[in-house]
């Protein structure tokens, strides 16, 4: 996870980028990924969750996903 931004107020969404290896393309494409929920868990606890809002093709064949965080509550 990188580029986490702190909102100035509660109405500003928190977005971060998630770099993915080229092999991620074997699992999903842009149409499948954008708008899809994504969640990270540690044991029984949800550490972060969000919605994929953008897909950026990288020169090395990888993908960078932009995720807008959502509340886990």
Image (cartoon, rainbow, N blue to C red):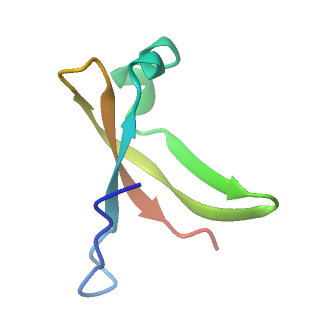
- Which residue is farthest bottom? 9
Q: Is residue 39 above or below residue 12?
A: above
- Which residue is farthest right? 44
Residue in the picture at 34% in, 84% down = 10
Instruction: Give the quarter of the image for residue 30.
Output: top left
Residue in the picture at 46% in, 17% down = 23
Instruction: Give the quarter of the image for residue 14.
Output: bottom left
Residue in the picture at 28% in, 17% down = 61
Residue in the picture at 41% in, 54% down = 1
Q: Nearer the viewer, residue 35 or 60?
A: 60
Q: Nearer the viewer, residue 65 or 70?
A: 65
Q: Is residue 27 above or below residue 20?
A: above
Q: Position of residue 33 (x, y in %)?
A: 43, 30
Quadrant for the C terminus, please.
bottom right
73 relative to 51 in the view: left or right:
right
Q: Is residue 7 above or below residue 29?
A: below
Q: How many tags in the picture?
A: 0
Q: Position of residue 45 (x, y in %)?
A: 75, 65
Instruction: Give the quarter of the image for residue 20.
Output: top left
- Which residue is farthest top? 26
41 relative to 52 in the view: left or right:
right
Q: Position of residue 58 (x, y in %)?
A: 21, 26
- Which residue is farthest left? 59
């Amino acid at each position: 996870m990188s580029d986490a931004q702190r909102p100035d107020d509660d109405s500003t969404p928190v977005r971060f980028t998630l770099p993915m290896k080229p092999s991620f393309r074997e699992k999903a494409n842009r149409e499948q990924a954008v708008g899809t929920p994504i969640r990270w868990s540690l044991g029984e606890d949800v550490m972060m969750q969000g919605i994929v809002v953008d897909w950026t093709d990288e020169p090395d064949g990888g993908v960078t996903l932009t995720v807008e965080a959502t509340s886990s509550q």
